[in-house]
């Protein structure tokens, strides 16, 4: 009798040792699965498959806590029905809800004997035991892991301990997955916020200017932004060509795509080719890895090629191909790459003259000049100076964190300058003047200190010195000078010019003069 009991005890110990060894192996496989997969739900399903195939644990189920509702949602189920609808358990509801509420393991020797068993998902064998353990992240319960052991009740405690170890591994993966999800959501929200800010910054409402020339530019931008047409922005340095390129991209169907910029004048041919088309590893000394060029980076979006008139005739042929066919090879590579890119280029050079002199390819010129937009010089739209100055000053004020303003005498001085550096010069001038202004009010003293003088010949800085009967003045200059002398009172200006108030009002409108309130 003693011998028989001893044999049973030895046999039981051997069975437990074998089970423990098997569980250790399964635990190792579970850790491998949890560490390698990127699809979290797929990972959990694979874990339940391992428990079924190697761990003698069947009908595995993982339910995770929905942080918004506080309910458990069945996230993974081994051998469940294909058309299973989303199943949820409230805290305390059924066996699964009881584990959530108590945050403790639950072992049932025969599941059908427990009155809390709901059988809601229809997969459990009512004759088998049931083990459910909480999935924890720190002290918080994040879900429930449940399964049915196929062996007898003698090994239930070992299966319970094993499932607790598996649940601990799952908990770490849940924490990591949620951290990644939260980080991705934060990045998405930040991206969307930045997109809204960028679109707002480059929206049509922020394009400043009421002169006839600028109204024509704005209308062109509105129309061309809708399409994929190549645009060539032309004009002197400092007129705002890059701002126009930004407005075209961020108001186009490609606004969610990349906007890539490159100043073509900043690089020699060999570096320009690598920068635009990329290079393969080992293509030249220093090419230690493969690198995508600006055209590949701009795929699905827009590329802005500033100072396009500066590229050499040798490189013009290489650029022409990508503009015509959307194809290129990386430096040092033989494989052809194809991209979908909208091209906006800019130049301050006389390309027509350079085509005649054979310094710029005619075919490239026609490929670029599909939709030309001419940016007027600031001296040709002086009536925009007040609005531009205020817009730029508000921008500077935000940077300096204080209020800034310009007095009337200073504004007249600004309108009398010929602005050879255009809008860029105006912005630099205002920034320097704001630095010199202790009170935040910019007057003629601050402007004069940085060398701005009345060089326009129209006398707008000191309008009383202008003879409005001077035959060298054109009609627009004469109108502005008279308005300045009259303090921008139209009736007084009309008397100076021998016109009626109605006539001067009509001429102000047709000449595109923005009336100032003094």
Image: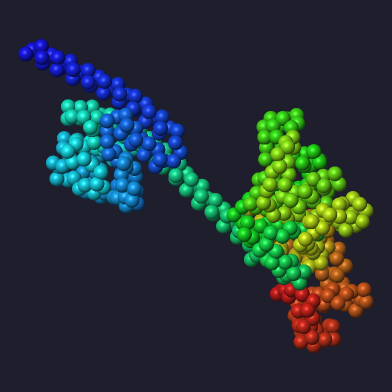
| Residue 499 horizontal side relative to residue 57, left or right | right
Q: Is residue 369 above or below residue 412?
A: above
The residue closer to the viewer here, 97 or 153, is 153
Q: How many marks?
A: 0
Q: Quadrant of residue 41?
A: top left
Q: Is residue 422 above or below residue 465?
A: above
In this view, which residue lies farthest toward the left? Answer: 1
- The residue at the point 74 percent across, 69 percent down is 216
Q: Quadrant of residue 65?
A: top left
- The residue at the point 18 percent across, 17 percent down is 11
The x, y position of residue 88, in whole percent, is: 29, 50
The x, y position of residue 323, in whole percent, is: 75, 52
- The residue at the point 16 percent across, 35 percent down is 109
| Residue 227 horizontal side relative to residue 238, left or right | left
| Residue 69 horizontal side relative to residue 458, left or right | left
Quarter the N terminus occupies: top left
The residue closer to the viewer here, 387 or 144, is 144
The residue closer to the viewer here, 356 or 61, is 61
- The residue at the point 20 percent across, 27 percent down is 155
Q: Is residue 517 above or below residue 71?
A: below
């Amino acid at each position: 009798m003693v011998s028989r009991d001893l044999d049973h005890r030895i046999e039981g110990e051997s069975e437990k040792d074998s089970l423990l060894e098997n569980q250790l192996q399964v635990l190792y496989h579970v850790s491998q699965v949890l560490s390698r997969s990127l699809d979290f739900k797929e990972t959990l399903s694979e874990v339940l498959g391992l428990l079924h195939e190697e761990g003698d644990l069947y009908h595995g189920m993982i339910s995770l806590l929905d942080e918004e509702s506080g309910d458990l949602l069945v996230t993974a189920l081994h051998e469940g029905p294909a058309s299973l609808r989303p199943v949820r358990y409230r805290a305390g509801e059924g066996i699964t809800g009881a584990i959530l509420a108590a945050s403790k393991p639950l072992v049932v020797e025969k599941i059908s004997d427990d009155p809390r068993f709901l059988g809601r998902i229809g997969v459990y064998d009512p004759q088998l035991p049931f083990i459910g353990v909480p999935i924890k992240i720190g002290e918080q319960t994040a879900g429930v892991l449940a399964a049915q052991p196929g062996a007898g009740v003698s090994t239930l405690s070992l299966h319970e301990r094993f499932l607790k170890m598996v649940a601990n591994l799952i908990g770490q993966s849940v924490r990591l997955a949620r951290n990644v999800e939260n980080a991705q959501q934060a990045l998405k929200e930040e991206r969307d916020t930045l997109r809204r800010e960028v679109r707002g910054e480059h929206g049509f409402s922020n394009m400043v200017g009421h002169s006839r020339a600028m109204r024509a530019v704005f209308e062109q931008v509105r129309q061309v932004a809708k399409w994929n047409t190549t645009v060539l922005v032309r004009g002197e340095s400092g007129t705002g060509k890059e701002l126009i390129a930004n407005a075209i991209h961020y108001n186009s169907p490609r606004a969610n795509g990349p906007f890539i910029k490159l100043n073509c004048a900043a690089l020699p041919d060999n570096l320009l080719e690598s920068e635009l088309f990329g290079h393969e590893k080992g293509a030249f000394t220093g090419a230690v890895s493969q690198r995508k060029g600006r055209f590949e980076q701009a795929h699905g979006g827009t590329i802005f090629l500033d100072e396009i008139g500066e590229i050499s005739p040798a490189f013009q042929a290489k650029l022409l191909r990508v503009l015509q066919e959307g194809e290129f090879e990386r430096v040092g590579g033989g494989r052809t790459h194809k991209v979908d890119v909208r091209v906006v280029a800019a130049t301050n050079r006389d390309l027509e003259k350079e085509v005649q002199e054979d310094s710029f390819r005619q075919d490239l010129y026609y490929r670029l000049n599909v939709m030309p937009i001419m940016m007027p010089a600031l001296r040709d739209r002086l009536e925009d100076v007040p609005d531009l100055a205020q817009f730029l000053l508000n921008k500077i004020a935000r940077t300096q964190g204080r209020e800034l303003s310009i007095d009337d005498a200073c504004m007249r001085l600004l309108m009398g300058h010929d602005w050879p550096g255009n809008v860029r010069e105006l912005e630099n001038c205002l920034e320097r003047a704001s630095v010199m202004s202790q009170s935040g009010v910019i007057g003629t003293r601050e402007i004069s200190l940085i060398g701005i003088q009345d060089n326009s010949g129209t006398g707008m800085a000191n309008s009383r010195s202008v003879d409005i009967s001077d035959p060298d003045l054109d009609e627009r200059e004469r109108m502005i000078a008279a308005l300045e002398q009259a303090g921008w009172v139209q009736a007084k200006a009309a008397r100076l010019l021998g016109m009626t108030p109605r006539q001067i009002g009509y001429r102000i409108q047709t000449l595109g003069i923005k009336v100032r309130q003094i």
